[in-house]
């Protein structure tokens, strides 16, 4: 199965991890891609050295010289074709995500659909990169803003959305006139190779080779990107710990970043919540992608009267979850990405018990090949005395807290250092409005009667505090990929200064 998928995606036997129009003969470390479901090797990729990275940046820079002058709607034509090519390969790309990351089939396909959606969005955007006209205080002067391409930008991605996060950045960056250097997670080199092969074909047909470039590697290549003054923007998606380093390095040279870092997302369940909606939303949020989404639901703040019924129904729902091969129909929970992730899951549960938590269901690693664990619900004491819940453990562990009031729930939601996604379930207007108000959730995403994960591409995506403050995808996120220029044109025949300043010379 894996072989056929790799062959249809034209990456069987391909080993180079660097591409800028053509694949380079890379000499870096060999990265072995393993199927987390079986532990079997899917392929080996030679990562890029810093010399390869310099070569790719050089040819990307040449490509930028002409790409930035192609009218944006024509740049959009290339993205339209790319989106169509993704449609043709959707099944295989989705299957490859399942093979390399362990996402269940519909989530793998959903990730490819997200790429297609952002391409559609970017095509429309290519005719809408609008600046504003501003009233000048001087007669017969015209003042306006315009937006120009930035240059070669770096996109560093995490393992858990091995294609979509690149596409959010790359589709917008391309219509904005930038060229992209992509450094995927070393855990997911094959998904990156497959996307690059499709991009290569489309770029060739549109005389645009060098717009999308690939550099498979790890921290060394990422760090080189952060330090490189020829790269005006580093869009980084990954853990808060690594994001801090990236921010310091890029900030040190006064470059720009988009930071999409860790989350620790909570759902508040009020006594009047509709459990028909809340239970499936929480279950998907906590178990989807095996709890390895930045938006995964990790904490529940249930009002005291509804808490017993909610936990009982959640535990019942958890017992129906089929764990296994993510490509088999009916599976809802696939493996974690690595044995280290399984160890982190086990360590978190040891800490949870030590800190006064009670495991209501799950709690064990499965005795079978692959990185499988049981989805787990922990009844937790007060959050203040339960430090494990303040951390993002990338696994299907859900901590359930009981609270007395909305104010207590909001305070607990906001207490952690991360600020990505949040939600409330209630049938009442006042609590939902308070949750969305300035005294409500402090997260970048706040939902009512919808869980924390599964955002649409039309909105700006990102979070506050330790989540990094970046925004990607929809709304006006495109502005981060361009530079703003304020222009004033004087057609008066005189030379008046602003603020009435007089400076008569000669
Ligand atoms: P990670 O931080 O281990 O790795 C992310 C990327 O950073 C990888 O490509 C890695 O090779 C690279 N990297 C490592 N060291 C680097 C360095 N010194 N300089 C530059 N790059 C370096 O994260 P992960 O385990 O792949 O992904 C999980 C994390 O990503 C979680 O914390 C999750 O919440 C976060 N994430 C956030 C979002 C979001 O949109 N906020 C989306 C997906 C994942």
Image (tube, grey):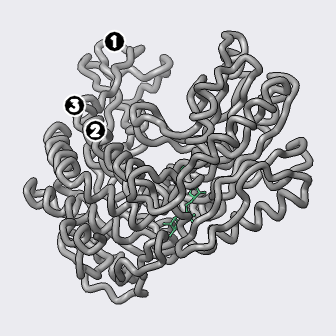
Foreground mark, 3 or 1, reads 3
* Residue at the image point whose x is 34% and y is 89% from the top: 27
Residue marked by disc 2: 122
* Residue placed most toward the observer, 20 or 90: 90
Lower position in the chain sequence, tag 1 or tag 2: 2
Label 3: how many Cα within 10 Å (few below 14, some 14–19, many 20+):
some
> Left of 434 or right of it: where is 380?
right
Residue marked by disc 3: 127
Q: Secondary structure at mark 2?
A: helix
Label 1: how many Cα within 10 Å (few below 14, some 14–19, many 20+):
few
**How many numbered marks are there?**
3
Q: Quadrant of the C terminus?
A: top left
- In space, the residues marked 3 and 2 are separated at their CA atoms by 9 Å
Lower position in the chain sequence, tag 3 or tag 1: 3
* Residue at the image point whose x is 36% and y is 82% from the top: 44
Lower position in the chain sequence, tag 3 or tag 2: 2
Residue 489 seen in the current view: yes
- In space, the residues marked 1 and 2 are separated at their CA atoms by 38 Å
Residue 50 seen in the current view: no
Residue marked by disc 1: 139
């Amino acid at each position: 199965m894996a072989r056929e998928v790799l062959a249809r995606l034209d990456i069987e036997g391909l080993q180079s991890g660097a591409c800028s129009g053509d694949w380079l003969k890379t000499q870096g470390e060999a990265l072995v891609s393993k199927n987390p479901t079986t532990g079997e090797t899917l392929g080996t990729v030679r990562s890029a050295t810093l010399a390869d990275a310099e070569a790719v940046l050089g040819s990307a820079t040449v490509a930028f010289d002409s790409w930035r002058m192609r009218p944006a709607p024509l740049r959009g034509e290339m993205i339209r074709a790319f989106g169509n090519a993704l449609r043709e390969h959707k099944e295989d790309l989705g299957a490859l995500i399942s093979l390399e990351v362990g996402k269940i089939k519909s989530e793998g396909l959903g990730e490819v659909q997200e790429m297609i959606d952002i391409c559609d969005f970017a095509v429309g955007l290519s005719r809408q990169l609008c600046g504003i006209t501003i009233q000048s205080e001087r007669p017969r002067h015209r003042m306006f803003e315009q937006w120009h391409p930035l240059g070669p930008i770096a996109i560093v991605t995490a393992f858990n959305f091995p294609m979509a996060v690149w596409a959010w950045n790359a589709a917008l960056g391309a219509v904005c006139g930038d060229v992209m250097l992509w450094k995927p997670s070393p855990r997911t080199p094959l998904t990156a190779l497959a996307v690059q092969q499709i991009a290569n074909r489309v770029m060739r047909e549109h005389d645009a080779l060098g717009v999308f470039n690939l550099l498979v590697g790890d921290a060394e290549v990422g760090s080189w990107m952060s330090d490189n003054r020829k790269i005006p923007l580093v869009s980084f998606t990954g853990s808060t710990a690594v994001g801090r380093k990236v921010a310091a390095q890029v900030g040190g040279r006064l470059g720009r970043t988009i930071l999409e870092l860790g989350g620790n997302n909570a759902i508040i369940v009020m006594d009047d919540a509709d459990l028909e909606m809340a239970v499936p939303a929480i279950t998907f949020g906590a178990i989807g992608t095996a709890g390895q989404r930045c938006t995964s639901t990790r904490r529940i703040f249930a009002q005291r009267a509804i808490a017993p019924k909610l936990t009982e129904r959640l535990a019942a729902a958890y017992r129906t979850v089929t764990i296994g091969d993510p490509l088999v129909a009916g599976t809802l929970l696939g493996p974690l990405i690595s044995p280290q992730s399984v160890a982190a899951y086990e360590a978190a549960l040891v800490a949870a018990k030590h800190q006064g938590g009670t495991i209501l269901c799950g709690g064990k690693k499965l005795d079978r090949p692959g990185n499988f664990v049981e989805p787990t619900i922990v009844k937790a004491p007060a959050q203040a005395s339960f430090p494990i819940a303040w951390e993002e453990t990338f696994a299907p562990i859900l901590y359930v807290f009981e609270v007395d009031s909305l104010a207590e729930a909001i305070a607990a939601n906001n207490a952690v250092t991360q600020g990505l996604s949040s939600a409330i379930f209630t049938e009442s207007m006042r609590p939902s409005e308070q949750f969305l108000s300035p005294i409500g959730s402090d997260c970048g995403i706040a939902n009512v009667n919808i869980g924390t994960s599964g955002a649409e591409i039309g909105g700006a995506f990102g979070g506050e505090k330790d989540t990094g403050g970046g925004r990607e995808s929809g709304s006006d996120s495109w502005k981060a990929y361009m530079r703003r220029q304020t222009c004033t044109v004087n057609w008066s025949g005189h030379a008046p200064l602003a603020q009435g300043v007089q400076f008569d010379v000669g």
